[in-house]
Structures are given as C-alpha cells and as structure tokens.
Amino acid sequence: MSPPARIVIVGASAAGLSTAEALRRHGYRGRLTLLDADPHHPYDRPPLSKQVLAGVWEPDRARLRDQAQLQALEAEFVLGEPALALDAAARAVTTASGRVLHGDVVVIATGLTPRRLPGQDGLAGVHVLRTLDDALALRRELSAGGRLVVVGEGVLGAEIAATARAMGLEVTLAGMGRTLLGDQLGETVGTLLGRVHAERGVRLRLGAAVDALAGDAGRVVGVRLAGGELLAADAVVVAVGSRPATGWLEGSGLSLGDGVECDARCRAAEGVYAVGDVARFAHEGLGRRLRLENRTNATEQAQAVAAGILGADRPYTPIPYFWTDQYDVKIQAHGLPSPSAEVTVVEGHPEQRRFAALYREGGRVTGVLGWNMPKQARLLRQQTLTT
C-alpha cells in the first residue's frame, strides 16, 4: 500500500500536531496541512487553568513546539481559519474563507466546545476557559481581585477555583453534584477534595442547580441558584462541561453521536480518521465505546492514527489516564474509575493526604487512583489493569 500523497489534519492542538509529528517520524514525506480556527501556534491546554491563568507562565511557555520544530515538520499551517464543512466521500474540507482543502486522508482533531449557560453571552464578566485567549481574558479579569463564582464541580472548575483562590480572590464554587469530581472519581475522593478547597477558603455550594445569571447594566453581578440564593460575583466562570466540536460535520456523511463515531482503528470512514477529545472509538479490550477527554489520550491516539494511515492494522486499546493538580494535591487516575465502584485504599491514608486506591466493579479492578502517590499508582496500574 502506497502512502497518501496529501493529508489534511483539522485541528492543530495536541492531537493534531502529535499526529503530524508521528507521521513524519514514521517516514511520511507527503504533503501535510494542519488547519485550525485558533490563530495561535500549537499550545498545551492543561497549563491554561493553572500556570497561565495564575500569571506564572507567559503564553509562549505553553507552546507545544518552538518555531524551528514546527518548520522542521515541513507542514503547512492554516491558522485562524475555521473548518465549516467536510465532504467525507471526496475528503474535502471547506474553510470559513471558502478555501477547499483536498486530502487523500483527512484527520479530524477539532476537540471540544465549552457548554454555556442561557444568557451568558450577553453579559460582560462571564467566562469560559478552553483557549489561550480565554485564559488570558480571564487572567486580566482576575488580576483586579474581587469575588469569583465558578459554576461547575468537575476537573476544570475545581482547577480554576484553586488557581483563583491562590491569587487571593474570594471564590465560590457551585455545582449540581454532591462532591467535587464526584461524577468521575466518586464520593470518597470528591469529599476529601472538597475539604481541601474548603480549608483553603473556597465557599462550596454543591448539590444545587444554577437557575440564572444575574446582571446589571450588561455586566454579571451574581449567580442565582435554584433555591433562590444569590451568589454575588464580580466575575463568573462557566465550567459545566463540553461537547465534541462536530457541528461543522453535519451533513458530512459521517456518523455523529457523542463525538465522531469510529472503529477500533479510529477510522470514521474510508480515508477519514478522528483523534483526541472528538473521537469516540471502539475499545476492543474493554468491549465498549469510549471518548476520552485528556491530554495523554490526545498523544497516544495520535500515534495509533498515524500508524493506521501508513498501513498498520492494530486496534487502539489504551489504559485511560488523567491527572489534575490543585494546590499541593496531585491526583492521577488510571483506567475507568467511576462513582458506582467500590473504592479500597491499599496504601497510605486519606487523612495523611497521601494514598493509593483501587476501584472495583463486579469483583474486577477497573481503576487505580493516586493522591500524591504517583509511583505507587503506576505500580498498581501495572499489576491490576490490562486492556
């Protein structure tokens, strides 16, 4: 099988860039084009809610590669240009300017779009955090101090709350869940993480839905909960989750559900692949379909997609992994921990703020978690998790 002459990668963040780099490492010498709506050269997203938001890093430090490394890829970067449509059968991508990019192979790496609350787009002082520009706009807002309300009890909301509190702001975190990260890591870990935030001075308003954003003269002044309580705010961050960025793929001929539906080789159609947060693939080892929203998957899946484009025929069967840093806490989760699992601490102790735990469902270990125990968590992963 001869390699494709032209490959178009839609999305130039971690997943798209890693795909391009893997192709070149495997000897691909054809034409590579990377298209992205973001005007900036590829940058890393995990630091946006921490180092960049806090002002510890300037934007250039979050760049994934320097200019010389990007030039060495010998790829065309089309930045600040959103993709509007895909003809999957013709493998043709139409951009916002009307340009049509043809590829023998198209890789979809468009990631996620933040969910929004009704009315938030008409109010100044309300933010989401997905892009570098989002992080810088929020950083400018927070530099004035004052009261911040974070809506959303997941990883992103908790990280933003921790960063803002360390910057000296008054922080309230509201969310429908009973605990922080409860939907991902369960009540045991979520309750402890809530205690950490409360000890640092974050006000938690959990288990309550947000009814509306309150504004005055076009600017947000608070968040009203379903029970009537008004959380006063000088700024609000909405971190209520994201959805796969697939709107531009309507009518493309691809199967779209919770992301771009792919087979076990990350193929969405003949000559069309998906990678990263946007890809929902069949995991043969686990016997289920997954869509993974984490930095590690973006890189690992890119290697599998590049190999598949160049003729390999191997299923993508990762052990999922994500991490979060909040204050002096580093949480690392391997596998598929869930709130329904039985959690057993096997090393350390939660009260010591240093422990490793196993998640079991049906008598089988499905996840491993380390709280300030990275080495022990890795060892437990090697001993207990397989794909």
Image (cartoon, rainbow, N blue to C red):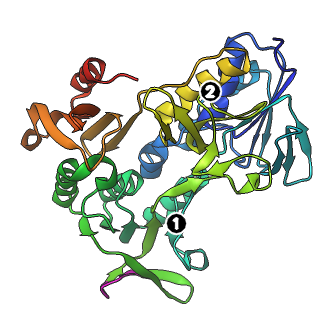
Question: Which segment did they paint magenta?
Answer: 223-229
Give the vertical position of 217 relative to 319 (above or below): below
Which of the image's four quarters has the C terminus?
Answer: top left
Which numbered disc flags the more N-terminal residue, 1 or 2? 1
Give the vertical position of 93 relative to 368 (above or below): below
Give the vertical position of 166 relative to 278 (above or below): below
Amino acid type at image mark 1: His
Q: Is residue 251 magenta?
A: no
The residue where tag 2 is placed is: 265
Amino acid type at image mark 2: Arg
Element type at mark 1: strand
Of residue 284 and residue 243, the one placed in the foreground of this image is 284
Q: Is residue 202 left or right of residue 224?
A: left
The residue where tag 1 is placed is: 127
How far from the left and from the top, in percent, is residue 69?
A: 68, 21
- Disc number at residue 89? none
Give the vertical position of 272 relative to 214 (above or below): above
Element type at mark 2: loop
Which of the image's four quarters has the N terminus?
Answer: top right
Where on the picture, by quarter, is residue 166?
bottom left
Of residue 10 and residue 63, the one placed in the foreground of this image is 10
Can residue 150 be seen in the rendering of this structure?
Answer: yes
